[in-house]
Amino acid sequence: MATDTNRSNGAGPIQPPPGEDNHQIYGVYPTTGYKPSNKFYPIDIGYVPPEARGASPPLRIAIVGGGLAGAAAAGCLARLPNVDVKVYERSDAIREVGALIGVMVSGMKVLARMLSPANFDELQRICYRGENVDGINHRHWRTGEILTTAISPHTPRHLQEGRTSRVALHRVLMNEIPDEAAVFRYGKHVVRVEKTPREHDAHNGQGEQHDTNGPDAGSTEMKLHFADGGTASADVVVAADGLYSKLRNQYFPNRKVRYLGRVSYRHIVPWETIQHIQGLPKDTSSWRRNGEVAFMSPIGTGGYSFTCMVIETEEYAASLRWAKSIGPDGLRRLREHHFAEWDPIINEVLAAFPDMDAYPLEAAPWVKDLAQDDALAFVGDAAHPTAGGGGVGSSLAFADVRALYLSLWRSYNSQGPANPAAPPYDIPYALHLYNETRSALLQRVERQIRYDHQDAAYIAAAGDDEEEWIRRYRERFTINWFILEDEVDAKWQDVEAEERHLYPQKQKLANQNVVNGV
């Protein structure tokens, strides 16, 4: 086994978390002295809308999907004034699946604003940050030598990237929901939506029929259709139904999900399972080779995680089941077929693991226009299925939710709308702000994922020339700070400050085009 000095404090076996002194081993920022605001202001400074006045009905928000994006949206959007939030989740209960998940600096910034102080403290507790390491150590695939480190300079410890389990992160988000029983509707599989005249307000109360295609936002609503034949109505639909989104397929039928040629294998074990391994790094490390990657890291909930993404044929991937065990034979195949020549520490860890779960990686082209029908917003993997690319999926989803919250907040009218039967929000304007805030960055991220694949091919072309391989690796290694440390609040303020002036003219032009049949 390689025993180079680049192993982070790896001279002896890792000890179990030492109780009260867990900050030392987990690298968690001690929150003593750090006091997040107990005010959930949409932005750090600026106008905070008053509570609703009058008899306007609440804004009915239907969130499709109860995963990370859906749970984040439920807790966040419920803080808007005069809203009624419902989450429609196809499963009969929340499924506790998944393994290691990273929360980037951008995600930490968002969650610092979205979570209550108690839940942000809980997030700190469950997140692991390596000892004396700001980010991830990227190692040579064969020797384990640290080639470079991804860091976040000038970022305070409590906002640095952290690793945890998906289950623990989802629980934190669920804790933000005021009343889960009142908000969540389990066993409700939304298969399509349609924009229809508002059923309970076909007329405006004065005998006048609303023009459902006109500018009166109170005249229409979204009808959700369930697999069991039932329906529900909402003013705004948040599509958070993930990679296999029925709603994305409805609006963009040509954006098909396809297999990417790789399978991710993931599992978490208790500390005791791997504490005997000599030289095991106490950091988060990645090993990369020609399109394949392995990640190993402690997690803040007291476990140790192994995650890899390796090349598999489509036929073999089809024999696997999502989030299901590959069993002893599959684990042995993983060691012998994929990692036999890699850093020996990887095989030692795999030998200690009792099992591994498989996740064939699939993706679809990303949604370019995140707002549809002036009433639906795509968030998370329903909008941009990353398939693990860059480890940024959850943080992008949280930023989506934050941008949507800010946009709806800005469109709120405490005086009530012109149509008293409509909710006090300008929904088309809110969704316009949301789309303008997020679409450009997301399109840039999608391009960067393609560029990263090109860089990987360039490095792989070095073949067995190890010196050249290392040179190319260091040459092309890039910390994509524009993604990892993105500031969604600043971008939203940039967009809103301009669109408040441009939007009326854009709407006027759009209405003229409708009249002219353009």
Image (tube, helix red, strand yellow):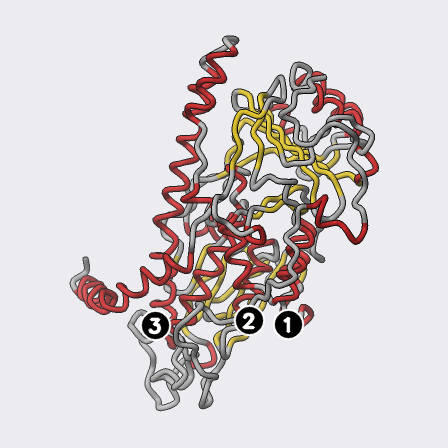
Horizontal and vertical percent for residue 187?
Answer: 67, 59
Label 1 crowd (10 A; few <14 / some 14-19 / many >=20): few
Q: Is residue 248 left or right of residue 277?
A: left
Q: Please name whichever residue, 185 or 478, is drawn nearer the observer in this view of the structure.
A: 478
Question: Counting residues from the N terminus, which is met first, the one under dot 1 or under dot 3?
Answer: 1
Residue on which the image places disc 3: 212
What's under tag 3, amino acid-wise? Thr
**Distance between the Cα atoms at labels 1 and 3?**
34 Å
**Distance between the Cα atoms at labels 2 and 1?**
8 Å
For the residue labelled by badge 2, is the local secondary structure a helix, a strand or a loop?
Answer: loop
Q: Is residue 514 left or right of residue 164?
A: left
Q: Are marks 2 and 3 in contact (CB under 8 Å)?
A: no
What's under tag 1, amino acid-wise? Pro
Q: Are marks 2 and 1 in contact (CB under 8 Å)?
A: yes
**Distance between the Cα atoms at labels 2 and 3?**
27 Å
Q: Are marks 1 and 3 in contact (CB under 8 Å)?
A: no
Residue on which the image places disc 2: 78
Tell me where residue 482 sits by quadrant. top left
Question: Counting residues from the N terminus, which is met first, the one under dot 2 or under dot 1?
Answer: 2
Looking at the rendered image, the quarter that the N terminus falls into is top right
Residue on which the image places disc 1: 178
Q: Is residue 270 left or right of residue 419?
A: right
Horizontal and vertical percent for residue 344?
Answer: 70, 19
Tell me where residue 449 sits by quadrant. top left
Q: Please name whichever residue, 50 or 132, is drawn nearer the observer in this view of the structure.
A: 132
